[in-house]
Amino acid sequence: TGPLKDMEFTIPEGGGLRFVYQFTSEPPAASFRLTGEKDGIIDIVPKTGILYLNGSLDWETRAVHKLQVESLDEKGNIVKGPYAVTIHVEDINDNPPEFDQIKYTGVVRQNSRPGKPFMYVRATDRDDPTTPHAQLMYSILHHFPNPYKEMLFQIDSVTGAISPSKMGSYYLDPQKQDTFTLVVTVKDMAGMTMNAFTSSTDVIITVKESLWKAPSTIRIQENSTQVHPVNISQVHSNEPDVIYELFEKEKLPRLPFSIDQNGVIYVTKPLDREEKDTYTFFVVTKDSEGELVDKPLQIHVIVEDINDNPPVCQQALTVIEVQENESGGSNIGTLVATDMDEAGTLNSRVQFKIQSQVPTAPTSNLFFIQQDTGILQLTSRSLNKHIASNYSLKVLVTDAVFQTICDVQIHVIDINDRIPIFEKSDYHNVTVAESLPLGTVILEIQATDGDEPATGSSYIIYQVKEGDPNNTFIIDTDPETNRGFVKINKALDFEAAPVYNLVISATNPEPLVQGVQYNSSSLTLFKVFVTNVDEPPVFHKTVYKEVVSEDIAVNTLVVTVKAYDPEGDTVRRKVELQYTGWRSSGVPTVLLSLFSMILACLPLSASPDNAAQKSKATLTLHLRDVNDNPPQLAMDYPPFFCHPLNGGERALIQATDADEQRYFSAFTFSLANDMNTRNNWEISKVNATHAYLSPKHANFEEKVYNVPVIINDNGEPPLERRVNLEVNICQCSSEKSCF
């Protein structure tokens, strides 16, 4: 209740009869009057001023009622007012959603892109769109048939857009199933409550064959004379208004193909199969924002051959060698010609025919060529090098359109039917000193061969056939003159072989023809006498090596060397010390660890003038280290500690040893076994050569302390040294040193 004034009320729709408000008044007001959009539902009791509803409000009919109320006196005159009364009708969810069609039909193409809508369903709700009452959510309730675990279609819950799912994009096939029925539901309240209204409809979907297909392999004849570009194929997207593009699989300077916005593919220029016989590229479709619409299609193009290439001789001149005794019918060689047209087709088939032969003696058809292989054959056994040593052939090579002339030259090779013959059957003898150097020529020999010069049939190889089991001699041949040079190949030794009775043979590298054999004319004799030369003595070894300890006793036998004289004379020895290498320690009193001695041996019978008959050998003596040096401290200054001590101080000490490394690879550090030292100091090892010395407490005075330290080198035998280490405990400067 309350006095008259402007009022606003919010009342839910429905609900039937109800009281809203009671207006009060003061005299002379005796009644109330209500005017405006009452719609037969809203009224006021005149005497009491009660505003009431005699029925249900409906938001869908009127969402706001605008009214006026005023008070009247007994005569019906207005006392107060009119005042505005506004009633807002509050919507309740009292209307189910409704589809705009009883049944929907749609068409989808096979292989359509997943998520790309091909149709929409639409529903409306009469409730207040600003409230959840009219917020709709779409879903697929059933899917008939449904052969897979996942649905082939999906729907956007807000927009009602229906599209293939990923499964559907892959499996939809009109050959297997061309019609599907979807039961699509729509719920208000955004589907968030159990009390939401739900409606449903059927969606009949027809699956049609995909338009987006790669064409069959495209075949284009090379070197086309048509005006380019030429239409060679067309592709169609499943979606309208797409942009067609090509992209190449191979990185070519320029792809000779293009596509227009109707999906028509063109070849832009004549193609050459010999340059490139196949092309592979892809067609893609994009939407207006550059996103791919369809899966890329692979396009395969084969360039078909035409006969546009003549046969080509593999060589400008084909040279063939034939022995003059070759039998009729023999294959003597092959002429090779190629054709760049497509292999395995008649365009590249080549055939051969001999067009001419020069000279024509002894007959004009000495040679035959196989028509399809190019193999050359002799027609008879008529070749004779003395009649003609060379033949020139012109061979006609043809394909179905073109022809080419190939040149062939045939060399008639002399057969090895003559043996080398020595100019002398015996070269008698020669006397040489055993001291001649290797490679010395001791004799020149000569044989001749009647076969063709500068061939394997006439070249002569000289060999010692008998009398030289150790290959002491070797014979070189001058290839221009076939002259032989007998040389010393190994050192001569009068004492081992004073005489050689040699049998020398002359042969050819080319085998002799059948029926011809080497005989005594290809052999010669030769005797070599070796004279004695006084030679120096010889050591049994050129180098003697020994190892001795550095503490070896004086007059100990180190090594025994032996030598002999090739002539059998007595050998006397003289030792000449020549130090050729030193490893000095820098301390004169220390023995050198390595030195060499040159041992000289002279024959006892030699005179002073024959001092050249001297031999030398090398003795390398390695001295082995022994552990004869005790370890010692290696420190530039004594350790110190700053007073007063705080605890935790330590000083690093280092030991070294003059012996070889292996004897001091691990020193042992310890303190002398006296009570005072062990109560005040401790030592701990850091590594093989270092240790820390530390005070055990802080109660030290400022003075110098003697700390006895024992260092053991752990050698064989082990050596140790006791060192009185002076340790200074002092006042320190800022630089951490004693004042």
Image (tube, rainbow, N blue to C red):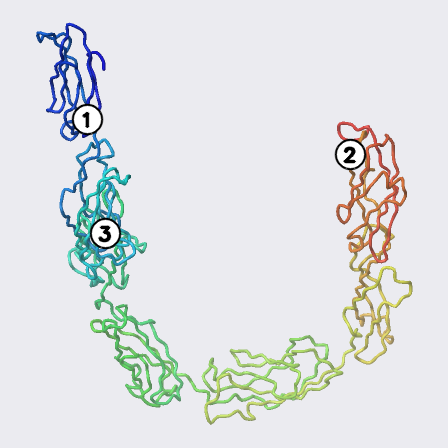
Q: Nearer the viewer, residue 612 or 279?
A: 279
Q: Which of marks 3 and 2 is in front?
A: 3
Question: Of the residues under marks 2 and 1, which one precedes in the sequence?
Answer: 1
Question: Mark 1 and mark 2 in contact (Cβ < 8 Å)?
Answer: no
Q: Give how far across and how far down residue 559 sits, in percent.
A: 84, 69
Q: Is residue 560 above or below residue 215?
A: below
Q: What residue type is labelled 2?
A: Gly
Evaluate if marks 3 and 2 touch, with contact meaning CB atoms under 8 Å apart.
no
Q: Which mark is drawn over residue 257?
A: none
Nearer to us: label 2 or label 1: 1
Residue nearer the viewer, 22 or 332: 22
The quarter holding residue 411 reads: bottom left
Badge 3 density bin: few <14, some 14–19, many ≥20, Cα 10 Å? some
Q: Is residue 51 above or below residue 570?
A: above
User: How many numbered tags mark residues here?
Assistant: 3
Q: Which amino acid type corresponds to the residue marked 1 in the rendered image?
A: Val
Label 1 belongs to which residue?
Answer: 89
Query: What type is the residue that disc 3 sits on?
Result: His
Residue at the spot of label 2: 647
- Left or right of 587? Residue 187 is left
Is 332 rendered above or below residue 580?
Answer: below
Q: Tell me which numbered mark, 1 or 3, is placed earlier along the sequence.
A: 1
Q: Which residue is drawn at 15% across and 31% down?
A: 60
**Residue 564 shown left or right of residue 34 in the figure:** right
| Residue 245 visible somewhere in the drawing | no
**Horizontally, is 435 left or right of 26 in the view?**
right
Which label sits in the foreground, 1 or 3?
A: 1
* Residue identified by numbered label 3: 142
